[in-house]
């Protein structure tokens, strides 16, 4: 096999080995509940950042309320489990679909708004959902939150050990990120990028801009809902405070620090902004200042992000073999 | 192919386009000229759906298109470029042109994720064809923002060509180009026309229009004042008056 074909395969295999071999082996060896929790939260936020990357990074819509759809997914999963005894197998897809449905309804009037007006509208949606979770006590149980006693119940098999839970979360997050990868690294993704660059111009060459914006908002919210359900099933407790404005901003910061328009960047941003505060736990309260300083410095010195869009797209084309196969003179252009 | 019937566009009291009727036949190369503020770009915006008509009707291939959204008009095979050069700056040259191919061929979210590469290959091939047509294949992987101004003009035309339109409308293609670049561009437009593409262009550069267009439509203050071959239009007293302000 030529090097041209071998390298991309090696990169993909290496990622799978790390995620499903080395990392769980390390976790099992260290055997600390706290570490499992940190890794799970990192995976959930990688999915949240990946989904927001579609809306804000690729389609260029500044979304300030992503945590709302994360929260909707979490509450659907938690309430279905605690009140109706509906477990993971059905609860997880329903959480995603519920978040997507509400996103679709919300998107109908908001998608005609542009730039800052869209941002303010999504800010309002985020606040609205947060207040509903907090104050609609009969349904959401208000500020007390919802306790979920059943863990992950996959097609009748109960998974209650930490390593099993890790594998389920890692598998779902990987599959979701693979879908997001296909959406952003394809001609569909190019059409989304054209909305960010100049949507009037895209309109003039046959791109249905309003429909595309609705689609990307709904799809990304579906994955935010899935992330929320994973949060609910793994922590077994959800409360309104987990889905407030600060959470939306944290996800946005991951996308921006990693690199707007770059999926690998969004994932790196999520890993950095979840792990850094944990690593710095030893230094006390000053850690928040350090985290802020790191964000500030990264934007100052790397305004295009830790892994900017141009290099990320080249990386995906070369290392993951996503480029057009029959490109003349073996150039890595286009998408497969 | 394109029929414009009694089309008007009023902005408040201003009649930007006032009861204009004209047509473009299959295979023609038509120029649209007129002094500043004559309503040329407004007429283009009416044709491409960016501005709704106040009254009148525009038909394309026998179908009424006034009232349709721009993307729907574009999908019928009517592609346009913009006066002030609009490319997607943070995308590569190839990716820019690919959006035109996506606009014509289409790729849904579902197809992007689950379908094989058949449709993507069609988009890729068509993109490459358009890139070669505008001589930008060597710079396929450069960012559009890094191209020279003149090349970006070709990029914008290439993106429109990737739709494989039947009618291409160009809004001031020679704006900002020097004489030799304008000459190259007019040769290129003539070549496209020679390959069977119907073209309508708005232009300030009278010599370019007079040299390459088969028919010239002249607008002044929103009204059509001439519609004939360049040689006739050149001697039309009304046109001379509109351009030179001659008072007889």
Image (tube, helix red, strand yellow):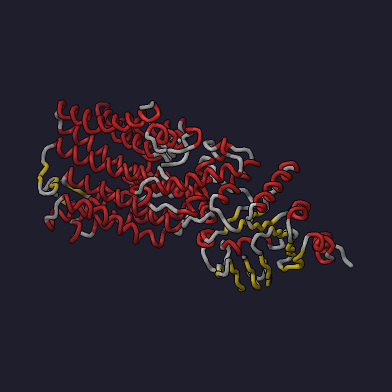
Above or below — where is A315 with respect to A211? above
Instruction: Please name the residue shown 20% across and 47% down the image.
Output: A232
Above or below — where is A332 with respect to A105? above
Q: Name the residue at the right extreme.
A: B248
Q: Is residue B66 left or right of residue A247?
A: right
Whether residue B155 is visible here, answered yes or no, is yes
| Quarter of the view holding residue A159 | top left
Instruction: Please name the residue shown 11% across and 48% down the image.
Output: A150
Residue A106 lies, in percent from the top left, at 35, 59
Count numbered badges in the picture. Answer: 0
Whether residue A251 is visible here, answered yes or no, is no
Residue B165 lies, in percent from the top left, at 57, 56
Instruction: Please name the residue shown 11% across and 55% down the image.
Output: A85
Which one is in front, A118 or A165?
A165
Which one is in front, A38 or B86?
B86
Instruction: Please name the residue shown 50% across and 50% down the image.
Output: B101
Q: Is residue B195 left or right of residue B241?
A: left
Above or below — where is B51 with respect to A177? below
| Quarter of the view holding residue A302 | top left
Residue B90 lies, in percent from the top left, at 51, 41
Q: Quadrant of the C terminus of chain A?
A: top left
Residue B180 lies, in percent from the top left, at 74, 41
Q: Quadrant of the N terminus of chain A?
A: top left
Q: Is residue A137 left or right of residue A245?
A: left
């Amino acid at each position: 096999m030529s090097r041209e074909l071998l390298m991309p395969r090696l990169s993909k295999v290496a990622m799978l080995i790390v995620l499903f071999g080395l990392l769980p082996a390390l976790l099992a060896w260290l055997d600390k509940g706290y570490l499992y929790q940190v890794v799970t939260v990192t995976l959930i936020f990688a999915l949240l950042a990946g989904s927001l990357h579609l809306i804000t990074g690729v389609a260029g819509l500044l979304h300030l309320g992503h945590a709302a759809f994360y929260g909707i997914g979490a509450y659907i999963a938690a309430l279905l489990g605690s009140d109706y005894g509906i477990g993971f197998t059905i609860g997880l897809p329903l959480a995603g679909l519920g978040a997507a449905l509400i996103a679709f309804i919300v998107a109908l009037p908001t998608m005609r708004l542009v730039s800052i007006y869209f941002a303010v509208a999504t800010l309002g949606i985020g606040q609205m959902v947060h207040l509903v979770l907090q104050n609609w006590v009969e349904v959401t149980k208000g500020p007390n939150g919802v306790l979920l006693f059943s863990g992950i119940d996959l097609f009748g098999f109960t998974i209650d050990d930490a390593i099993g839970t890790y594998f389920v979360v890692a598998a779902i997050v990987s599959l979701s990120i693979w879908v997001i990868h296909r959406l952003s690294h394809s001609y569909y993704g190019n059409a989304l990028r054209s909305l960010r660059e100049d949507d009037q111009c895209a309109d003039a060459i046959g791109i249905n801009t309003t429909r595309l914006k609705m689609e990307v908002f709904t799809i990304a919210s579906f994955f935010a809902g899935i992330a929320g359900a994973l949060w609910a099933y793994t922590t077994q407790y959800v409360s309104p405070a987990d889905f407030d404005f600060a959470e939306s901003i944290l996800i946005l910061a991951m996308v921006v620090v990693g690199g707007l328009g770059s999926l690998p960047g969004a994932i790196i941003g999520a890993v950095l902004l979840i792990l850094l505060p944990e690593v710095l736990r030893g230094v006390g309260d000053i850690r928040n200042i350090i985290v802020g300083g790191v964000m500030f410095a990264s934007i100052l010195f790397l305004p295009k992000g830790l892994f900017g869009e141009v290099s990320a797209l080249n990386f995906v084309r070369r290392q993951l073999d996503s480029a057009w196969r029959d490109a003349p003179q073996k150039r890595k252009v286009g998408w497969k | 192919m394109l029929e414009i019937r009694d089309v008007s566009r009023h902005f408040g009291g201003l009649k930007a386009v006032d009861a204009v009727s004209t047509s473009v036949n299959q295979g023609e190369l038509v120029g649209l000229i007129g002094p500043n503020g004559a309503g040329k770009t407004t007429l283009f915006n009416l044709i491409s759906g960016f501005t709704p008509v106040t009254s009148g009707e525009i038909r394309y291939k026998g179908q009424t298109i006034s009232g349709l959204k721009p993307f729907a008009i574009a999908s019928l095979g009517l592609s346009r470029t913009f006066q002030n050069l609009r490319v997607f700056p943070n995308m590569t040259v190839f990716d820019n042109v690919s959006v035109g191919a996506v606009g014509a061929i289409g790729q849904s979210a579902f197809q992007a994720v689950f379908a094989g590469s058949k449709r993507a290959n069609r988009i890729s091939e068509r993109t490459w064809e358009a890139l070669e047509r505008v001589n930008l294949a060597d710079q396929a992987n450069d960012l559009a923002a890094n191209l020279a101004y003149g090349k970006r003009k070709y990029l914008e035309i290439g993106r429109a060509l990737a739709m494989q339109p039947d009618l291409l409308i160009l809004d001031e293609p020679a704006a900002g180009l020097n004489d030799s670049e304008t000459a190259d561009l007019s040769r290129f437009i003539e070549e496209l026309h020679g390959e069977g593409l119907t073209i309508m262009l708005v232009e300030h550069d009278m010599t370019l229009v007079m040299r390459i267009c088969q028919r010239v439509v002249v607008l002044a203050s929103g009204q059509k004042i001439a519609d004939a071959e360049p040689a006739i239009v050149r001697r039309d007293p009304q046109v001379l008056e509109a351009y030179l302000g001659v008072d007889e």
